[in-house]
């Protein structure tokens, strides 16, 4: 045993893929004191307490999910920090980012500490928090951003709740810039999207459902970009869904604007046409868009405009999806399928394997400004070991998450996690 009680672990015989450091080779990985001790060759005096055999498996940095609603505190009937952190560990995810729309809202250090304390008790995946940009997410009065940062929040945002005015948005950006805080933005013009539940287009018209136009996203992106340039704040656009918005971000980045962006798994595989049977599992906010938008997202992901890919995990109880389509609660449970659906993008020729792993590791780590997502010597020992060829079917009884709501039930999945380690501790081992 090492000095702090952590085990010395060697992961042997695997294919080590570390996109940030340009490593893709059959190399052993040595872990000690919660960090990567060495890659390839054991450091002097290293004697392993535990040897993990990764023959036939990929060894990659622990996955980072930029948006996972854990439902605790406030909605434990949907899920808990315990259930979702354990599900994340089984899915190879070592770091989860919890948005601020819990109950109570994450607008005080006390709520931040409550969530961190519960996550520490569980001892599975790491939980990071985003602080509320405005008090109670009501969009009017700014939260004490400095206090939230001091409490450990990795950024701030207003979740999907609108700000009262462009002036409030500007003041919020100025305040965040003062403390070098990243603002996480959901691009939505509330007046344009109000009451909508599906992309505004042929499908919504045929179904008689209220639509959300593309402009609800692009207008909000344009307004935010103007204010980002004005204030110099570092900003991240969450869950973009339209081709036009991706191109706007690409242009802004080319011009040197300090922005990043992500999208979520459902928008890369599904379109508004999938909701033609009024199936509430296809009810998402922002909504599923067109095939053209889906293609644009894939292009943005492959080209690097979209730095990260997330699950946008939203577990629900069964009753939440039983009402007529517009009255159901939007979103899907996505933790269990994040890795295999990303690997499907590789099978479909959208991404290379290295790009796919980067969008789940060093990409989100860079957005958060944290030292995770890679396996160089000295890095935190967050590791995911998975068999990229194991095929399985996503059935309700296969889901580790408490939420069973997903449009991917019945889909064939490829890729099964064998081991997950966080800070050098084994938090999941395949039975």
Image (spheres, rainbow, N blue to C red):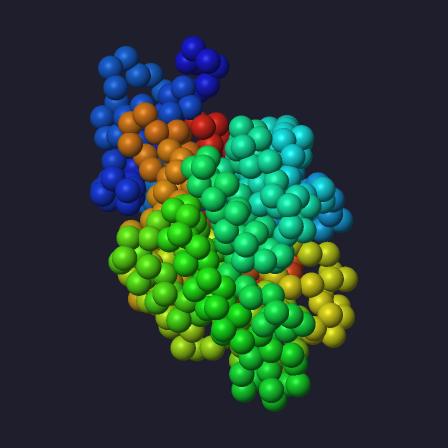
Query: 254 and 49: which one is in front?
Result: 254
Of residues 287 and 8, the one nearer the viewer is 287
Q: Is residue 144 above or below residue 258?
A: above
Viewer-side residue, 248 vs 370 = 248
Up-down: is 136 above or below 46?
below
Quadrant assignment, res 297: bottom left
Q: Residue at x 64, y 50 (%)?
A: 140
Name the residue located 32 percent from the left edge and 34 percent from the top edge: 375
Is residue 118 visible from the viewing direction of this image?
Answer: no
Residue 86 position in % (x across, y down):
59, 40
Nearest the camera: 353 or 264?
A: 264
4 up-or-down from 103: above or below: above
Where does residue 109 sit, x and y in percent of width and height?
A: 63, 31
Judge left or right: residue 399 versus residue 222: right
Count the numbered circles shown.
0
The answer to whether 402 is drawn above or below residue 36 in the figure is: below
**Residue reaching furthest to the bottom:** 206
Q: Position of residue 58 (x, y in %)?
A: 34, 45
The percent coordinates of residue 63 (x first, y second) are 43, 44
364 to the left or right of 79: left
Residue under the image location 43 percent in, 13 percent down:
1
Residue plotted at (40% across, 19% down): 33
In the rendered image, the residue lying farthest to the top is: 3
Which quarter of the rendered picture does the C terminus lie within? Answer: top right
Question: In this orientation, does residue 237 appear?
Answer: yes
């Amino acid at each position: 045993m090492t000095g702090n009680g952590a085990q010395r672990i060697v992961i042997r015989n695997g294919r080590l893929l570390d996109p940030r450091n340009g490593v893709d080779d059959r190399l052993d990985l040595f872990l000690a004191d919660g960090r990567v001790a060495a890659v390839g060759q054991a450091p002097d005096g290293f004697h392993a307490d535990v040897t993990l055999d990764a023959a036939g498996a990929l060894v990659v940095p622990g996955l980072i999910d930029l948006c996972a609603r854990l439902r605790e505190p406030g909605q434990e009937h949907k899920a808990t920090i315990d259930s979702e952190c354990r599900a994340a560990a089984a899915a190879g995810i070592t770091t989860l980012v919890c948005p601020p729309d819990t109950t109570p809202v994450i607008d005080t250090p006390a709520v931040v500490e409550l969530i961190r304390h519960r996550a520490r008790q569980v001892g599975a995946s790491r939980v990071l928090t985003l602080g509320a940009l405005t008090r109670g997410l009501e969009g009017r009065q700014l939260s004490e951003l400095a206090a939230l940062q001091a409490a450990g929040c990795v950024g701030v945002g207003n979740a999907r709740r609108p700000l009262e005015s462009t002036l409030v948005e500007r003041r919020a950006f100025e305040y965040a810039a003062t403390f070098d805080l990243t603002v996480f933005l959901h691009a939505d013009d509330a007046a344009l999207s109000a009451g909508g539940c599906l992309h505004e287009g042929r499908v919504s018209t045929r179904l008689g459902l209220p639509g959300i136009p593309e402009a609800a996203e692009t207008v909000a992106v344009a307004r935010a970009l103007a204010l980002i340039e004005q204030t110099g704040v570092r900003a991240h656009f969450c869950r973009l869904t339209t081709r036009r918005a991706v191109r706007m971000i690409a242009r802004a980045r080319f011009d040197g604007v300090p922005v990043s962006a992500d999208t979520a798994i459902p928008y890369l595989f599904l379109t508004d046409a999938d909701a033609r049977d009024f199936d509430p599992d296809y009810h998402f906010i922002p909504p599923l868009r067109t095939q053209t938008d889906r293609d644009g997202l894939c292009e943005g992901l492959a080209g690097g405009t979209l730095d990260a890919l997330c699950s946008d995990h939203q577990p629900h109880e069964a009753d939440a999806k039983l009402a007529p389509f517009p009255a159901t609660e939007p979103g899907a449970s996505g933790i269990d399928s994040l890795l295999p659906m990303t690997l499907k993008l590789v099978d479909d020729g959208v991404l290379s394997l290295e790009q796919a792993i980067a969008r789940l590791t060093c990409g989100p780590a860079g957005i958060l400004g944290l030292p995770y997502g890679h396996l160089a010597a000295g890095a935190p020992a967050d590791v995911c070991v998975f068999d990229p060829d194991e095929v399985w079917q996503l059935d309700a009884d296969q889901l580790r998450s408490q939420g069973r709501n997903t449009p991917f039930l019945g889909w064939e999945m490829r890729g099964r996690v064998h081991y997950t380690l966080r800070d050098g501790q084994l938090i999941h081992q395949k039975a």
